[in-house]
Image (cartoon, rainbow, N blue to C red):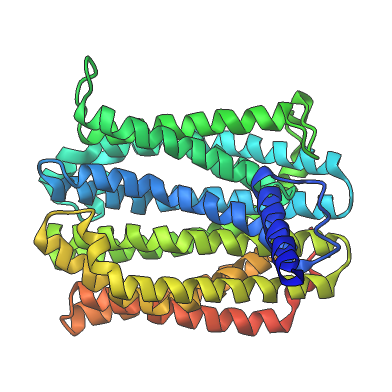
Amino acid sequence: MTETVIKKSLFSKIFSTLKQALNGDESFDYTAGSIKKAVILLAIPMVLEMMMESVFALVDLYFVGHLEHSSFAIQTVGLTESVLTIIYSIDIGLSMAATAVVARRIGEKDPVAAAKAGMQAIVIAFILSIFMSIYGIIYAKDILVFMGASGDAAEHGFRYTQIMIGSSLCITLLFLINGIFRGAGNAAIAMKSLWIANICNIILCPILINGFGSIPAFGLVGAAIATTLGRSIGVVYQIYHLFYGNGILKIKMSYLIPNFKQIKALVKIAAPGVLQFVIASCSWIFLAQLVATTGGDHGSAGYQTALRIMMFFILPAWGLSNAAATLVGQNLGAKQIERAEKSVYTTAKYNVIFMASITIITLVFGQYIISFFTNDEIVKAVAVEALQIMCIGFVFYGIGMVLINTFNGAGDTWTPTGINFFGFWLFQIPLAYILAKHFNMGPKGVFIAIPVAETAITLAGIFFYKRGRWKRTQV
């Protein structure tokens, strides 16, 4: 009887915590109480949010992978996503700065300052997005050719690229506003906005790609339209909750009036953060180009397929590691340094368990997963090889993500920027080039360089974490 009562009590606690995490509870104090519960409350919606972010590319990949000239379509989606990582890098850097400042102000119990900082970040986002959109629309075809696409592939897919890069504002706001909510401790709103955006994308993709009733079939272009519309609807949901929600952040239109002192403070944190992720993104772009030039259209399509699947697994781990950024930021704001350290350790432990599980799943079921996304046997063979080699470093990826978010959540954005510069540009790129070209390993050499470099980056992160500069950073 007692055992039954204990089980019911445990189940009740688990269900209550799960419900609290999914509903979003900004009243929970992340600077006090159970660290495990704090990590879980943040991690569950953040993991689901990042899963949904990765689903965008997978949905597009699935539907276009069954079109005529599917190798062109898959390559276009993959190469465009590789270029979009530069935009993602800017967005992540800016949202990371917003998360750090908002979390620090919330930890200091100053929600008005937190709200004002979040709105100034949006002002910056509007300005940046205008330039990125114009460039993408004008130079879409040139971008694909530069990335290694053949003339036929670029001609076939440039309109998809135009729409995707041209919708930079939607992408930027989706990342940024979610960063603001995460800093405030309400990761559930961020999760729900991505769920709404993806559900719309999943519904619209087959309709706009293949046609439905009086709606014509737009083919590859339909995938871009569907994704852009889905993201736009997600942004509308975010904006509604920013201005009319019941959370700790109370937004006023006057907060959008440019405050150059606040903008300067945000840029000071965001600039190295943007550089940090641009460094990583440019490395991935170089690798994509190297695979395309040494492996041809099929090699490139195979690599891009494997990469999209890998990102589907890695982004949830990034979501879990985002919990460290919020907890570190809020606890440093509350002068709880020891609690911030314990939060990092707990988050890292959970991420290692998650990534170890994903490694096993990928090694055992990788071939079946890839078969779901393409019918091309050559593309399939390359993708299987790429995925099985890259997954060897998943556990190190998991630890590295937590450390990066620890530094960024504390506002110490220069440390991970330096690590990324040496790890990606001075190690990963030369290693990939030597293996692919000098040793004539082609795409396989690129695949090998990825887990090797990520492992080295994680080891460097551990070294700098222990040095403790992040604990003393002021924002």
- Which residue is nearer to you in this view: 220 or 188? 188
Q: Say which of 34 and 312 sits in front.
A: 34
* Numbered marks: total: 0
> Left of 133 or right of it: where is 327?
right
Vertical comparison of 194 with 426: above or below: above
Q: Quadrant of residue 324?
A: bottom right
Q: Position of residue 401 (x, y in %)?
A: 55, 69
At a point 70% along the width and 46% down the height, the residue shown is 186
The C terminus lies in quadrant: bottom right
Quadrant in the picture for the N terminus: bottom right
Q: Residue at x 43, y 36 (%)?
A: 199
Residue plotted at (67% across, 53% down): 97
Above or below, 436 relative to 59: below
Is residue 334 positioned above or below 81 on the image?
below
Q: Quadrant of residue 436?
A: bottom left
In the image, what residue occupies the spot 49% across and 78% down? 396
Residue 113: in sight, yes or no?
yes
Q: Is residue 379 left or right of residue 327?
A: left
Residue 229: percent from left, percent from top: 41, 29
* Residue 70 horizontal side relative to residue 118, left or right: left
Q: Position of residue 442 (x, y in %)?
A: 18, 75
Q: Position of residue 291 (x, y in %)?
A: 22, 66
- Residue 47, quarter of the rendered image: bottom right
